[in-house]
Image: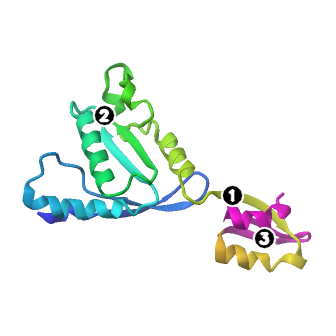
Amino acid sequence: MFATLDPTSRALKLPGGVSVMLIDTVGLVRRLPHHLVDAFRSTLEEAAQSDIIINLCDASSEEARVHLSVTNDLLESLGAQDRPIITVLNKCDLLDGNVIPLEFENCVRISAKTGEGIDRLLDAIERNLPVRMKRVSLLIPFADAGIVSEIRDRGTLLSEEYTADGVEVEAIADEKLYSKLSKYEK
């Protein structure tokens, strides 16, 4: 019975090259039996500690508004209101004329079936990351080649190639590391 409450984790590589971990928790069930409330709540307590919360809702459901309201109330009661929450409406391909009610205007609209809107969802995730990451192409002179090890330690080294002019590097760096690397940008 509780197997459905176990979160599932998956790695996701965003378009900018940053890898993130997605943790999929149980779907929300309204009018959950009282003896299951604590078990359900514990799965969402982890969500309250996340960097970003993706609140996915079936847009074709007649109860979509209620589901979003209940989920938002629960996330607020868990103290998650200070986290970025991206509301995602799935199954938008099933809506008549793709009309979305006004209260859903700030949502990301997708169709997992057709793939429509997935690019907008990935962009929204990247925009809401707590630490901004930047993909850079660098040419590092041999005299400064030691900075490549700093990239390995503090960033993500995507590629390195030794050339006659220095080390050509593709990397992903946070803002602090980027400030050191920007002078080497190609």
For residue 163: magenta? yes
Q: Earlier in the sequence, mark 3 or mark 2?
A: 2
* Numbered badge on residue 37: none
Residue 48 coordinates in the image, percent (x, y):
36, 60
Sequence order check: which comes first, mark 3 or mark 1?
1
When asked about the image quadrant of residue 59, the answer is top left
* Residue 131 visible in the current orientation: yes
Q: Position of residue 125 (x, y in %)?
A: 50, 50
**Number of other residues with Cα within 10 Å of mark 3, as a class: few under 14, some 14 to 19, many 20 or more:** few
Q: Amino acid at mark 1?
A: Arg
Using residue 107 as the reference point, say whether residue 45 is left or right of it. left
Cα distance, mark 3 to mark 2?
Answer: 48 Å
Crowd tier of the residue under label 2, counting other residues whose Cα lies within 10 Å: few below 14, some 14–19, many 20 or above: many
Amino acid type at circle 2 is Ala
| Res. 135 mark | 1
Q: Residue at x 46, y 37 (%)?
A: 117
The numbered disc on residue 161 is: 3
Secondary structure beneath label 2: loop
Does residue 48 belong to the magenta stretch? no
Q: Is residue 17 above or below residue 59?
A: below
- Residue that carries the numbered disc 2 in the rendered image: 59
